[in-house]
Amino acid sequence: MVPDISTGSRTYGLLNYLYGPGRRDEHTDPHLVAAWMPELAPDPGRDPAATLKQLTDRLDLPVLALPKHRRPVRHVWHCPVRTSPGDRHLTDAEWAQVARRIVHATGIAEHGDYQACRWIAVRHADDHIHIVATLKREDGRSPRRHEDGIRAQAECRKIEAEFGLQILNAGDRTAAQRPTSAERSKAERAGRTETPRETLRERVRQALAGTASEKEFFRRLAEAGLRVEKRLAPSGDTLGYKVALPGDRNRHGEPIWFPGSKLAPDLSLPKIRQRLDAGPPDGHTSSVARSDELAPRPAHARREAAPVAEGAVSVLSGDDDADSAAQLVGVGELLDALAQTSPASTRQELAEAARAFERATRSHIRAERADNRAVRSAARGIIRAGNALGKGEDGGATAMLLSTMVLVTIAAARWHSARGHAQQAAAAQQAVQHLRAAYRTAAATPLNAMREHGRRLPEPVRQRHAGTLEATLPQHAGQVLREPGWDALAATLDQAERAGHDPDVLLQQAITWRELDTADSVTDVLIWRLRWLGKLPATTTLPRPRTSSGMSNQQPQPSKEKAPGTTTRTPPSAPRARGARR
């Protein structure tokens, strides 16, 4: 059950909408279900003799009774209350009870207070009501409605439990401000799928991803096509900023501006400066994005980001809450970077993942002194590398990174759940689902090629790699050998061996790099870890013909670059027995 409080200045205009047909004739049987005094509130929906003017005059009477200088400009309090999809339809009597509890909890009209504000509850659909009140009491005073939105949310949680409805997660006042009803209505009339506030929030967040300086941040905002206006001190220093969408204007033809703090708590200029003051992403020793002159290739930037994301999983499994909170901010930037540069096949899912995870980056745990330069550097490298094509090495490298990002977001959900951050945990879980969908799309082509490679390997070679797996990973070997991805893993082990790596050592390193219990597919995780650790291509080619001993006619050439901790050897001339240890 979701309340959504806003204020306005036109009682008649709001009532005209509530009792009207709606924007698309969606309103049915508009009528009152409750009022401050039912006998004094005419119902234009059910009483043919009642008019909207009469109802407006009754509600506005305490406001109009005051001298003009004491009348509030925005004197109309509006609170739609909506049940969740899948909830049963409440009766009029139940909705009346909901309305009375909401106005009591918010201070609009407490039980037994006969001098309280006048209010009504209108129902014109099965799943919600609209509570309308005027913000002057009968005694001329203003209601005490401090934090009325929080109190309405808390009362809705109680109502959900008592009425047997879906119990939503409690808020903690760190969420971004939601669009108002007026903003949503305007977006619908304009044919937009989201409000300007939501569009601006996403674009500002994307401009911040991997940004190294305040100057670069404002440059990216302008490049994104936003109107930007800075608030300057007499000294010329920037105190704040606001943004607007081109063409989004009010009734007077003026741009509709949104300060950063009204888009999200962490998008105010002071919060952005705190993030930048922690150190520029280019200050990290990672090879990603070290030079403004030479941008990495998309595939290279994604490959280099994978171990950085793995490092964030390690931090989230530790005990340093401030460091973990900082890593979550960096992971959010990494997702924003991926969403901006992904091919069309995965762009929508990654954009949804980034939007969802944005909520998981904010909690009451502060991260000002923690270091997340490595993950922010990875985001910067991806932004500067530009758009990936989604084919060949680009597609494989994207799948490699997305496999790790799934584990990161699962770790984030666990971290938030352990600390009672219900909304953030739910947001991280939502991001997991979108990332899984994007991974399946990105990984389909490279994994299919690897499976074909693995199926063409001589049986003695497959048996030898199966033995390596059973000896190194006995607790997962049976599961892996039954999975469809086993052929792709065998191909990866074969490529590693051809590159001069010892499959035993490389597989052991992949296993100890991070636990595998949270993975949807142990095989997939191992494939991408092996390819990163062994510096193998993210794509594969069909194997060269082998001799009767099961090995290639050509001796494998050692890799020019070795991952730390890996060893090289010359492959044996004969296959090992299945399950044998070296």
Image (cartoon, rainbow, N blue to C red):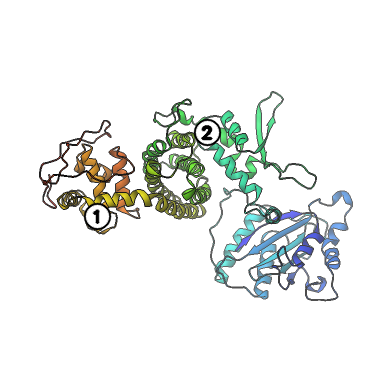
Which one is in front, 188 or 19? 188
Please give left or right for residue 475 compared with residue 293 in the image: left
Checking the image for residue 92, the label placed there is none
Q: Position of residue 519 (x, y in %)?
A: 34, 53
Q: Within the image, what quadrant is residue 481 found in?
A: bottom left
Q: Amino acid at mark 1?
A: His
Residue sitting farthest toward the top: 235
Q: Position of residue 83 (x, y in %)?
A: 60, 66
Which one is in front, 297 or 8? 297
Checking the image for residue 211, the label placed there is 2
Q: Amino acid at mark 2?
A: Thr
Q: Position of residue 275 (x, y in %)?
A: 52, 35
Give SS at disc 1: helix
Which one is in front, 299 or 318? 299
Residue sitting farthest toward the front: 545
From where the camera sits, is residue 109 visible?
no
Mark with earlier residue (2, 1): 2
Density class for disc 1 (Cα within 10 Å; few <14, some 14-19, many ≥20) is some
Give SS at disc 2: loop
Disc 1 marks which residue?
Answer: 476
Q: Is residue 393 above or below residue 470?
A: above
